Amino acid sequence: AQSVAQPEDQVNVAEGNPLTVKCTYSVSGNPYLFWYVQYPNRGLQFLLKYITGDNLVKGSYGFEAEFNKSQTSFHLKKPSALVSDSALYFCAVRPPGANNLFFGTGTRLTVIP
Amino acid sequence: EAGVAQSPRYKIIEKRQSVAFWCNPISGHATLYWYQQILGQGPKLLIQFQNNGVVDDSQLPKDRFSAERLKGVDSTLKIQPAKLEDSAVYLCASSATGAGNTIYFGEGSWLTVV
């Protein structure tokens, strides 16, 4: 069965520092991987996805993610955090042959001014 | 390009009452999804449509939940009768056909059952 793990419920980082939000997955085959962000009282906004090709994927708002097949990870990164990045971040996986997403439990990012 | 539209945004009902949520997907998107997001958890798929046909409703509590997409465009999700544990955000999403396509979400319909 497929699963997505976000091992940290909460990540705190100082404004201007680099940030990392971790995600690992357990899926047979080569899945598609996604990151979404959710601001308070809002829906999910798409940030980026990995389908194939370069392991480093660039997305919206300066975010990027690195796909590591051997470690089955897809960590979200940003070189310099902004206070406005504070939100709930979800990693999601689409297993081969599936057309829907399976989500992790989310990581709340707080950027401290 | 207009995004996924959902209404109402917020709804408070008493247990055993009924409620309906409406969704209009992004124009041209054949696939429509309803997800349930309980506070503190990630979204979970309730039902997936391809055009007006159901692709996956294995996680839909069919004794109380129903959904339809009669003309292959907009969709309605109904809960009757509601239980306290149905308090959640109901997210509608859509995508073009194809596994690599991005799924885009609406703002959600926030349900509180009291």
Image: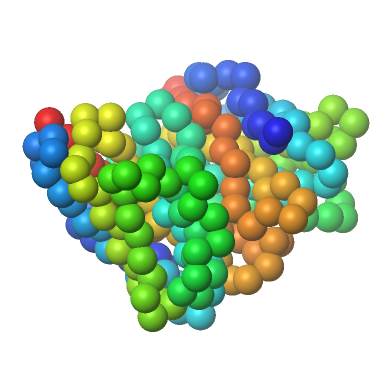
Q: Quadrant of residue B73?
A: bottom left
Give me the residue at 84% from left, 44% from top. Answer: A29
Q: How is the image coloured?
A: rainbow
Q: Is residue B46 visible?
A: yes
Give me the residue at 26% from left, 55% from top. Answer: B78
Image coordinates for residue B113, horizontal then vertical, percent: 17, 35
Q: Quadrant of residue B7?
A: bottom left
Total residue callouts = 0
Give me the residue at 83% from left, 46% from top. Answer: A30
* Residue that protrudes farthest toward the right in the picture: A70
Residue in the foreground of this view, choosing between B113 and A35: B113
- Residue B13 lies left or right of residue A106; in this view the side is left
Height in image: A11 above or below A52?
A: above
Residue in the foreground of this view, choosing between A70 and B34: B34
Image coordinates for residue B9, horizontal then vertical, percent: 22, 53
Image coordinates for residue A22, horizontal then vertical, percent: 66, 27
Residue in the foreground of this view, choosing between B7 and A57: B7
Give me the residue at 21% from left, 30% from top. Answer: B84
- Residue A56 lies left or right of residue B108; in this view the side is right
Residue in the foreground of this view, choosing between A17 and A71: A71
Q: Is residue A19 visible?
A: no
Image quarter hosting the N terminus of chain A? top right
- Residue B11 lies left or right of residue B99; in this view the side is left
Image quarter hosting the C terminus of chain A? top left
Image coordinates for residue A85, horizontal then vertical, percent: 48, 38
